[in-house]
Image (cartoon, helix red, strand yellow):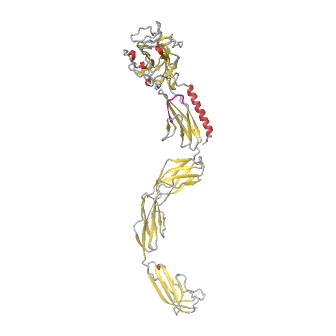
Amino acid sequence: MNRLPITFKSFLLLLLGWFLYIQQANSQITTQVYSENFNIGSGGWTIGGYAPSWKRGIPSLPNIVSNGTPCFVTGDAGASAVDPLTQCITIPGATTTGNFYNCCERSFVESPPIDLTGILSPMVSIDFNLHCEQTFDGAKLQISVNGGLNWSDVGTYSGSAYETFPSSVNCRETNWYNKSGVNYLNSTSGGCSNVSFSFGGGNSGWSGGCGQGSGGACSNPDSHGTNGWITATHCLTQAANKPDVRLRVVFGAGSQTYSDGIGFDNVKIFDMFPVTAFTAVQNSACQPQIQFNNLTDCAASYVWDFGTTGAGNSSIVANPMFSYDLPGTYLVTLSATDYCGGTRQITQQVFVNPGGAPFIDTIYTTASGICNTILDSLVIEVSPAIPGSPPYNVAYNFNGVTQPPVTTSNLTIVIPGIGSGLVDQIILSDGSACDVAFPNSFSVPFNSDGITVDAGNDTTILIGNEVVLKASATLATAFSWNGPSIFTDPLLSQITAYPQNTTPYQVTATSVNGCTASDEVIVTVKDNLPCDLYYIPNSFTPNGDGKNEKLEVFISPEMRISEFQMAVYNRWGQSIYISSNPESGWDGGDAGTGIYVIDVNFTCTSQKKSRFTGTVTLIK
């Protein structure tokens, strides 16, 4: 395999990631599914609630200035309207043309049905301008997903202090509420106790812009409220794939009114999905290690699939680092989920070069099953293409006990003398201190596979006859006979032998696993031949004429001599010649002409014995 240098390949991966990111960004996956700017009408939005001061038009309020186009706004109907509650406190400044919202107002502007079928990740965007009494008066957005039967608040505010706009919780929730407790969004206390209309939900909402000063007047300047038109956004996860969704902007006020209230415009709903992209850069490390850099534009959560199998193949970290066991090409998938619920994923190839650590091609034991006292060997093959830095040090456990490490510079590492048991926790370290842990263990068998062999029953033959021996065995694949006078193939299960004496024959059977079993059969040879078939002359003439030159004992082959001794004595009984070789004979030596006594003893293979005693005449 051709391998690019790590740094150059990482650069290519970075370029590829940026290319994919730019390509996705240019093919935007955010879709506008609803939009209303109220420029040519109300768009089906209707006003309702208790004592509403809303109207659609270009506002003429001192604090909610026009954004140049019509919108929905409170306050212009203000004090000129007949207030049904006599307990409302009159605030100096209200005129017949009025610009205040109504006291104890519980009003709303509700959208027409909006079909979000097939929209999986909706987000609302709304422009608004707020100026009202802090804490007491304010607005919020509510949603119904069942045709207006039930309403719930869109979002909450978890802070305790006023929030200064503009603000952002995340990339989908911007400028959304600035107070967790706006009294009259869900309360009828104080001077508004006779109001029975309720929005439901909580008290989080938009409030502020007018702080109450002494005598009930607005305290300005004020650091809260919007101080102009801003855009607020929030996810509508509860509206995903709903066919009848309705929104309403609700406004609540207390028994004292101070200012203009709220105006809203440009209501939009988008189908939001993150633009998903990433790059992968390989770090210089013992293991092939990849740093993944997340380029996704906006997501709440991430799930990575690194393209391998087994445990640890995934991550939910935004920018994870992952170590691969092997170099190669992997398909890596990043799935990103938007704050509004939409999920997008990207899959791209990641090229992983070898790390600095050695790569183990394989680990194996040399025997397929060991028997009796045979020992096995563990062999570790280091890849010549990815050798790391020798020398190597191998640590391992055998039957739960840490063994002395084995050190070598060879790519083939042999650990001999492994008996039966479990070999595990194998760790290969190289000269650069890179460790490679092999995940598998090895169980080395020790017991026989159960092979047996039977050489047959002991037998008896007469001298001079042959015998056929046959072995039978279980699991055997080979035989081997051991004994004398075998004149057929000793590696067959059946042999033919011609023993001259009582003899044991051994057979060994071997299984496919190298296990062996042995047995023995004894062949008894009976000998019924005589032990006295010989001839000894009574004289000899060692005179050099080539005839009768020495005293010889002529023995019949049928005697089958196993022991022999001939002794010659002079007439005074002195031994002058002894021999155990029947073929050597006595040539007279230095003895002179005369009569000598000979004594010859025979022992045959049948254990029979015979003896000759007599005289012989030596003539020179």
**Residue 469 percent location from the top left of the image:** 43, 66
Q: Is residue 227 above or below residue 3?
A: above
Q: In which quadrant of the rendered view does residue 408 lie? A: bottom right
The quadrant of the rendering that contains the C terminus is: bottom right
Q: In which quadrant of the rendered view does residue 278 lie? A: top right
Task: Count the labels in the image.
Answer: 0
- On whether residue 301 falls in the magenta region, the answer is yes
**Would you say 8 lies left or right of 344 here?**
right
Q: Which is more toward the observer, 367 or 576?
A: 367
- On whether residue 76 falls in the magenta region, the answer is no
**Would you say 106 lies left or right of 344 here?**
left
**Residue 446 percent location from the top left of the image:** 45, 57
Q: Is residue 82 above or below residue 586?
A: above
Q: Is residue 558 above or below residue 311?
A: below
The residue depicted at 40 percent of the width and 70 percent of the height is: 459
Q: Is residue 150 above or below residue 413?
A: above
Query: Can you name the residue that lies furthest to the top here?
Result: 96
Residue 411 visible here:
no
Q: Which is more toward the observer, 113 or 596?
A: 113
The quadrant of the rendering that contains the N terminus is: top right
**Would you say 124 lies left or right of 283 here?**
left
**Residue 288 percent location from the top left of the image:** 56, 42
Q: Which is more toward the observer, 539 or 233?
A: 233
Residue 341 visible here:
yes
**Magenta highlight range:** 296-304
Query: Can you name the residue that lies furthest to the front here?
Result: 214
**Residue 474 percent location from the top left of the image:** 42, 59
